[in-house]
Amino acid sequence: MYREIRRSAYHLADPAAPWTEDYRALCFPEHWQSTLLTLHNHGRPEADWQRVLPTRNLDTALQTLAPEVIVRPRARPPIGEGPMPPEDFWMYVPADAPDPLPGRASGQVLNAWLRTLVPRRSEPAPELRALLMRCSDELTGTPLSWESVPGVDLLGTNPTDGGTAAPEPRQFQLATDALARRIRSLDPYPFEGGELRFRALPRGPRDQGAELMSQPLCRTIKRKEWWFSITLNISLHTAPFDPRPRLHLHWGVRRWATHTRSDSGRLPLPYGQATTVHLRPKIPWLAGVPATERGALARLRRDRASDGFTWAENDPAGILHQLSIVGRFPAPDRLLADPADWIGDGPGVRAAVVHSNHMGVHEVGPGLMPHQRSQLTTWAETALPAGVVRLPDLVRGRGKGIGAPANRRPKPVGEPAKKAEEVRAALARSRALVVLADRAGLTSEPADGQAHVTVRLLWRTAELRRHAVREFAKSLGLDGDGGAHVLPEQIFDDARPGHPAVLEWRTSELVVRLRCLPLTGGLGDRLVLDPAVRRKGERVARALAARRRELSDWLRADGADRNCPSLALVEIAHRSTFREADTDPKFANRLGCADAGVLTQFVVTPSGERRIANVDTVEHRAHHAWLDGFRQLGVRVLPEHTLGGDLPEGLQYAALWMVKRRKDGPTRLPRHLPAAVLVTPLPEGSGLCVVRGWDDDTRTWIPYPHFLLGLVKKAEIDPSAPDEPGSVGTADDAPRITAKARRTNLSEQRRETARFLQRMLYSLRNHPTVLITHAQNSRSHWPWLQDGQIEPDMIRIGHAPPGGIDDELRLVRVRGRVGRETAQWWGLAEPGKAHGQPAGFWAVRPSGDARRNPGERVFHSSTERPGTFAISPALDRLAARVNAAGNLTSQAGTGAWNPTLVEVAVLGCHTEQDAEPPSPPVPDEPEAIALATHQLRMAPDYPVALSLPLPLHLAGLAQAYVLPTLAAGEPGAETTEGETASEPSDDSDPDAADSSRPVAEHEASDEPPLR
C-alpha cells in the first residue's frame, strides 16, 4: 500500500532568498482614452456607450505578436465596497529581452486594433474615416516609452489576517511566465522514439497563468492517423492559512481534429460556438519583431451569410488577419477540408484545430497516467529557481486504509456473491423507501400499515419498456413483473392518461404501482420552433412553454398531484437526433412533469445506429436510471463516520451550492440561486437518513422531492427578453452588457445570498451540524470563502464584520478540479515500480507522536479507481514500441484516469471548550471533521466514489431543475484531464459540470484572483 503521495506543487523555502526578476514595463497611455472611446461609441445609442476603453483583443494580440510581452488587465472598480485597486503597468517584458515592438511594428498593431473598435455594422461614412485617421495619428504620434523595473519579487507576499498568502495580482502572471521561460530553455524531454519540444502559447491578461505545448505527435490507431500534443499549465495559487503561495504544474493532452465528415468533406465544427485554432508561423508575424516559437490562438465562427466558417473579426484573429500578407493566414475552407495538411511540420503558417467531444470520437485517449506525469514533472523541476522547492509529501491521516466509512460494503468476489449483494442492496433500497415514504409525502393512499408509492414509466419503444419494467423490480428487490406477463401488448399500446397499464407489487410493508403510458401526441418529439418568430430566444421560449403546458396537463389527467410528488422514468431520443440543439425536448419535458408534481429521470432510446450504438447497454442504463430516480425521491444511504465520540452525537450535514438560473429578464445577465440541502441520519441506523432542502420562501427545511419541484419556478424564461449576446440568431439591435452592469448584478446577488445564508444558518442552531461548501462554486457569491478573506473559526456574511461561528456549527470548504487549483499528484511507489493513484485521507506529516496540531486545518482526499479504468499506472502515452510480432504499437489510444486530489479545509470548528455552556462536550478535532467529510465521498449506494461529499453532491444535482446541464445541452469541450464523454446522467458529477463552465468574467477581471 502506498504510504505517501507527492504533489506537483512548489513554494519558496523557509528560509530562502526571494526569487526576483528584472523587467522593463510600460504604463497604459491614458491620453488615448478620450479619442478612442469616441471611435468605439460611434454610431451606438447613447445608452450603450462604454465608459472604459475595451483593450482585451489588443492585449491578447500583443502577447501573440510580441514573444516575451506580458500584458496586465487594467484596474477596475471593486465589486461592492472597497478601495480602487492600485494602478499597475500595462505591459512587462524581461529586462534582457529585445524590444518586443520595434520600429513600425507597434503602429501596425495599433492601427489593426483600431478597426476592431469600430462597430461591426457601421457605414464607412466620411466622418468615420476622419475619426479613424485622427485616432491613428493619436496612437502613432507618441512613441511607447518603457521604463526599468528591477528586482520584482515573484513569490514574496504579506499574509492576510487569517494567515493566508495574499499575492499581488501581477504575481499570478509574472511568476508563472518566468517559470515557463525557464522550462522552455531546458533540453527537449526525451522519450523512447522521440523527444518533446515545448513552446509557449499566448495567454490573455485574465488567464492568470502560463501554458506550454509540445509539437503535434502522430500515432496510427485503427489504421488511421491521429494527432495530439502534451500540454503543461503553470499556475499560482494559495491555500487556506498558508503564508506562502504555491506554483502548480499541470500536465494534460490536447487532441487535434484531422478527420473530415464523409458527407460534407470538412471538419464537423459546431455551429453554435466558436472553435479554437492554434497557429504557428515560420517567421514573425510582423517584420522586425524578434523571432519566436510562441503560437497564436484564433477562432473560427459560423458565417450565416455563406453557411460556412470564417475567422472571428473582432478578436485577436481579426487583428492577425489584417496584419498578415496574402497566403500567410490559412483560408478557413482549405483548413477545414484538409486539416492534416496544416498540422505538424511544413512550410508557412501551421494550423491545428482543437478537437472537442462534439466532433465525435478521437482515438487518442485523454489524460496522462501518474507514472508518466511524474517523469515529466521530474524533468520540469530541473528548471526551478534556487530556493523554490516542492511541497512536502503527504502521508496517511486518521482512519484505517483508505479511510472508508463504517457502513462501506466489501467488494463481492465471484458471481454468487455479486448477486447476493445486489439483492441485499435492493432490499435496503426498498426498506429506505418505506421509511421515507411518509416523511417525504410520497404515500399516495391513506396509511393501512403499508406505504403506497406510485411511479410512472413514459415509454416510446416496447424494447425499452420491457427492460425498464424488469430493472424497476430488480432495483427494489420485488418479485415478479407486477403482472406484465398477463397483460396483452395492446393494453400497453392503448394506455392513456387516466387509463394506464398498471403493474403492481406488494410486500408486507410496501405497495408499489408502476403506471405505464406511451408518450403519444408528439410529447416525446423535438420542440417545434415557429419560424415566424424573429428572435431565437423567443422562439425557444415559446416552444418550451407550449411543451411544458401540454405535458403538465397530460400528467394531471393521469392523476399527478404536486402535493404528492412522484417519479417518472421518461424515454427520450439520443441528443444527436436533434439536429438543432434548441429542439431537444429534455428540459421542457422535465419542467412540464415538475409542474404536475412529477420528478423525472431520462433514459435514451436504444439504437443500433453507429453514432449511438447503445443497444447492448439498455439494461444497464435502465437500471441506473431508476437508481438516479430514487435519489430524487431522497432515497440515499449516508456514509457513517468511524470517529465515534470524537464527533457530536447525531451530527447532521448541510451543504450549499450556487445553481445557475436562466437569463434574468431584459438584463440578460446570469443569475445564481443559492440552494441548500440538509442530510440528517435516522436512529434506525444502517445509513438511513432524511434528505431535505431549504425553502427560503417558507424558511423551513422541506423533503428533497418537494425541494426539487420548488426550484422549477426559478427556471422561468421571459419570452420578451433579448437573446444572449453572441448567440446564433441574436437580434442586431440587442443591447450590450457592460462591465459595470455585470459588477452591479453580482453585487446584488451577493446581498441576496447573504440574506439567504442568514436565514438558513439560523435554522441550524441548537443541533450539531457541519456546513459543507465548495470553493470554486460559491466564493463569488459568498466572498468569505475566498482564501484572502477566511479566518479560522470565524464567519462573515454580507458586510457585517467577521464573528465567531455558532456553538453547534462547523464550517468545511472543499476545493475540486476547477481552475487546476488542486495540484496533480501520484502515490510514491517502491524503487523500481510505477507510481500509482492510491485512495486515502492525507495530511501533512506530524512532527511528533502526539495527535495533530489543532491549528492544522487543511487535509486532502482521494478515492479508489473505478473498475472501468482497470489500466496500469505505467501507461505510456508517448512511446511507440515494436512488439513481439515486430509491429509498431502504441498505448496512445488508451484513456487515462486522472482523479482530483480534493482539498478539505476545516474553516471553522470549536477546538477549545468554553467555560460556560452551551459548548461541545468534547473539543473538536479538525482532522476528525475532515475525515468524516472524506468518508462522505464513499456513499455505499453509488457504484463509484463521488467527486464531492454526498450532501454537496445532492445540492449540486438540484441544477437539473433550474437550468439544463452543460453535458446535456451544449457541445462538449476538449478535456485534458482524462474525463471521458458519455451519455449524460441526471446523477452525474456536479464538480465536473462546474469545471466545464468558463470562469465568469467578474471572477477573472474585476477583482484579484479568487483563490
Image: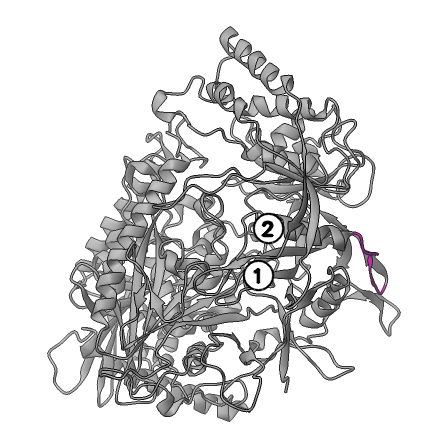
Query: Who is closer to the viewer here, 12 or 38?
Result: 12
Q: In which quarter of the image is residue 596?
A: bottom left
Res. 509 in view: yes
Res. 366 in view: no
Q: Give the range drawn in magenta.
A: 185-192
Pointer 2 with pointer 1, Cβ within 8 A: yes
Q: Mark 2 points at which residue?
A: 171
Q: Which residue is drawn at 50% across and 24% down?
A: 33
Residue 9 in the image, given as x and y percentages of width and height: 63, 65
Query: Who is closer to the viewer here, 169 or 841?
Result: 169
Q: Which residue is drawn at 30% across and 61% down?
A: 675
- Disc 1 crowd rating (10 Å Cα; few below 14, some 14-19, many 20+) is many
Residue 295 in the image, given as x and y percentages of width and height: 71, 41
Callout 1: helix, strand or loop?
A: loop
- Disc 2 crowd rating (10 Å Cα; few below 14, some 14-19, many 20+) is many
Q: In which quarter of the image is the N terminus?
A: bottom right
Q: At label 1, which amino acid type do we have?
A: Pro
Residue 818 in the image, given as x and y percentages of width and height: 51, 59
Residue 901 in the image, given as x and y percentages of width and height: 55, 71
Q: Mark 1 points at which residue?
A: 245
Q: Residue at x 62, y 57 (%)?
A: 155
Q: Is residue 79 above or below residue 405?
A: above
Residue 210 is labelled as: none
Q: Does the magenta stretch include residue 316?
A: no
Query: Who is closer to the viewer here, 978 or 314?
Result: 314
Magenta part, dominant SS:
loop
Q: At label 2, which amino acid type do we have?
A: Gln
Q: In this view, does 451 lie above or below 796?
A: below
Callout 2: helix, strand or loop?
A: helix
In the figure, is residue 311 to the left or right of 953?
right
